[in-house]
């Protein structure tokens, strides 16, 4: 069983460090029963996920410990009052794809990617760009040149800081893939040579900042980035 680290806990909510490959919530069938919520339920009397991470993504996952706190924290996510920061390694910096349904801004290796995306029902859970029927997905990105720049089997690797304003399924993975910067280890959106560069998806939920639902104090939860 993969390690399950508790990063923060009080009587109202907990934050765990979900490892890559572990589901956030149970899937269909007994083989998909093991998940972050099920493991937390074995420790705490009442827990519910406030948001989710992709199975392949590691990092901070927040869970409420009573229904009222669950309602408040879920509302904070829905109202975009939670600041989420991810780190990813990529082999190229994002570029404007010049596609309908994609807006790209870049100023000195930082900017914003806006997509209109939806589920591809013929290829679940894959997401596709659809400027007419897609939902808006907004991501701020920034290259961190001082923190990580090295050579890999595929060439130079760059570290990106990603701040999604929305919480669409596979939002960050799709945005980077569309902009020519697929994440190594991404088996859904990466080209074959990019997929093979890493045994895991190099995407990690690194920081969560939000207002405590009871005390009103600012809460900042961080975790060590594993790559």
Image: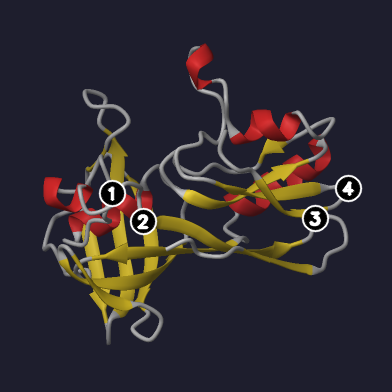
Q: Nearer the viewer, mark 3 or mark 1?
A: 1
Determine whether, in the image, residue 198 is placed left or right of residue 84: left
The CA distance from mark 4 to mark 1 is 37 Å
Q: Residues within 10 Å of mark 4 (few under 14, many from 20)?
A: few
Say which residue label 3 marks: 213
Of the numbered discs 4 and 2, the one sitting upstream in the chain is 4
Q: Earlier in the sequence, mark 4 or mark 1?
A: 4
Q: Looking at the image, what colour scheme do you see?
A: secondary structure
Q: CA distance from mark 4 to mark 2?
A: 32 Å
Q: Position of residue 101 (x, y in %)?
A: 21, 53
Q: Earlier in the sequence, mark 2 or mark 3?
A: 2
Callout 3: helix, strand or loop?
A: loop
Task: Tell me the mark number nearer the camera, choosing from 3 and 4.
Answer: 4
Q: CA distance from mark 3 to mark 1?
A: 36 Å
Do the residues under discs 1 and 2 have CB atoms within 8 angstroms? yes
Where does the N terminus fall, quadrant-wise? top right
Q: Which callout, 2 or 3, points to the residue nearer the camera? A: 2
Residue 46: x, y in percent? 81, 31
Q: Which residue is mark 1?
A: 185
CA gap between label 3 and label 4 equals 11 Å
Q: Quadrant of the C terminus?
A: bottom left
Query: Does residue 198 appear to the left or right of 56 in the view shown?
Result: left
Q: What residue is drawn where x is 19% and y is 61%?
A: 179
Q: Which residue in the protein does label 4 denote?
A: 11
- Ranked by sequence position, the earlier of labels 3 and 1 is 1
* 160 versus 194 height, above or below: below
- Above or below, 38 relative to 103: above
Q: In this figure, which residue is indicated by the disc labeled 2?
A: 202
Q: Secondary structure at mark 2?
A: loop
> Label 2 vs label 3: CA separation?
31 Å
């Amino acid at each position: 069983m993969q390690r399950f680290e508790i990063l923060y806990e009080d009587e109202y909510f907990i934050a765990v460090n979900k490892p890559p490959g572990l589901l956030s919530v149970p899937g269909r069938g007994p083989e998909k029963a093991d998940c972050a919520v099920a493991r937390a339920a074995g420790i705490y009397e009442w827990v519910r996920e406030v948001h989710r991470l992709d199975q392949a993504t590691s990092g901070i996952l927040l869970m409420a410990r009573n229904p009222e706190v669950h309602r408040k924290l879920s509302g904070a996510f829905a109202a975009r009052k939670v600041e989420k920061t991810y780190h990813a390694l990529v082999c190229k910096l994002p570029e404007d794809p010049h596609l309908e349904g994609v807006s790209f801004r870049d100023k000195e290796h930082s900017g914003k990617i806006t997509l209109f995306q939806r589920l591809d029902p013929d290829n679940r859970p894959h997401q596709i760009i659809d400027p007419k029927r897609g939902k808006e997905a907004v991501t701020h990105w920034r290259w961190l040149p001082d923190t990580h720049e090295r050579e890999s089997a595929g060439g130079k690797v760059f570290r990106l800081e990603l701040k999604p304003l929305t919480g669409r399924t596979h939002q960050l993975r799709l945005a980077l893939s569309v902009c020519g910067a697929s994440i190594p280890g991404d088996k859904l959106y990466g080209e074959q040579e990019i997929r093979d560069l890493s045994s895991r998806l190099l995407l990690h939920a690194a920081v969560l900042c939000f207002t405590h639902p009871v005390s009103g104090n600012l809460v900042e939860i961080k975790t060590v980035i594993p790559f």
